[in-house]
Amino acid sequence: MQNLTSIASDWLQNPGSLRLLFIVLAGGAILFLGLGLSYVALGFTDPVRRRLASSAAIPGGNGRLLLTIQTLVGPATAWVLPKSEVDRSRVTKQLAYAGFRGPNALRTFYCIKVGLTLILPAIVLGAAPWFPEVPTPKLMFFMAMGAGLGLIVPSYVLDHLMKSRLRTLSRAFPDALDLLVVCVEAGLGLSAAIQRVADELVVSHAELARELSLVNAEIRAGVDRSLALRNLADRTGLDDIRGLVSLLIQTMRFGTSVADALRVYSEEFRDKRMQKAEEEAAKVGTKLIFPLVFCLFPAFFVVAIGPAVIRLIDVFSQLVK
């Protein structure tokens, strides 16, 4: 292994070898770019795909543009999507938690990922003539860094969007639960109460209102009520909503009062929120130690002890004289 490492290092230090490696990488990039353009040309010239793209009724230019892009890159998705079903289901679940539940969401995500992986090194290579002082090894390092960013950044953005949406739904859930309790106790049925809560929250909490409206849409389309509620828990990914769904399904199965069950769950959830707030308040003292030690105490010591230190320095300087 050490011999192979020394041979590789000697080969990379040779300018002719570096030039050959750069030519091979550039040729491979041009080859993949040509293959991608050929797939795009095939998708563009396919009459079936053109008919689908032109006849799709998507309001707004952005939706039509997105559909056109998905139609063009359709033949290349077989090389892009992961082969493992576990990876597909995991990424699909993350996309659903982030709010992307379209049939082409997984395909679009991986196409963006591969596109950035190819485009960023191409941008670095295209900008190389304007920086002739940059050596070839550093240029190859920048190209590899661009390819790495193209692989990492989409996953990071997806994770950020997923956490942001979960946080938004978590903040909206207490208001929705209180409204649901009020509507059910007022005499509305469960489906009517869910729709009324969705109508009331459409301005303040649009994400949760959209999810609740989708539950009623599934029920009106013929989906079983228990399955529609389970789909709500799967789409949101929140433990609080999953607990509420389990409670409602159990209540409907055993025929008990939905209003009583919701009232008990609301009280327990309110106690849980209070305990969480008390826990966060108890952590404040510990979290303030580091700002106090590193920010407040040095300024306090300078103000309180600084004049005494200056006087001591003056006294000792007079004694030395």
Image (tube, grey):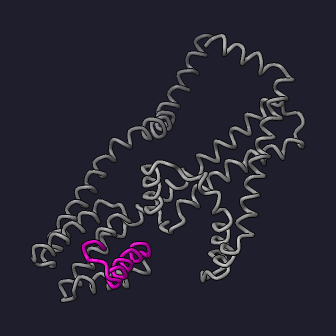
- The quadrant of the picture occupied by the N terminus is top right
278 or 39: which is nearer to us? 39
Does residue 138 appear left or right of residue 81 in this picture?
right
**Which residue is at a point 73% across and 51% down the rendered structure image?**
119
232 or 184: which is nearer to us? 232
76 or 135: which is nearer to us? 76
Residue 262 % position (x, y): 18, 74
Residue 85 % position (x, y): 44, 51
- The quadrant of the picture occupied by the C terminus is top right
The residue at the far bottom in this view is 187
Is 215 a magenta residue?
yes
**Which residue is at a point 28% across and 87% down the rendered structure image?**
192
Q: What secondary structure characterizes most of the magenta part? A: helix
Q: Relative to 88, does residue 176 appear above or below in the rendering?
A: below
**Which residue is at a point 36% across and 70% down the rendered structure image?**
172
Does residue 47 appear left or right of residue 165 in this picture?
right
Residue 187 % position (x, y): 18, 89
**Which residue is at a point 88% across and 33% down the rendered structure image?**
133
200 or 105: which is nearer to us? 105
Please identify the quarter of the rendering in which residue 169 is found: bottom left
The residue at the far front in this view is 47
Query: The magenta stretch spans which residues?
Result: 205-228
Residue 266 % position (x, y): 20, 70
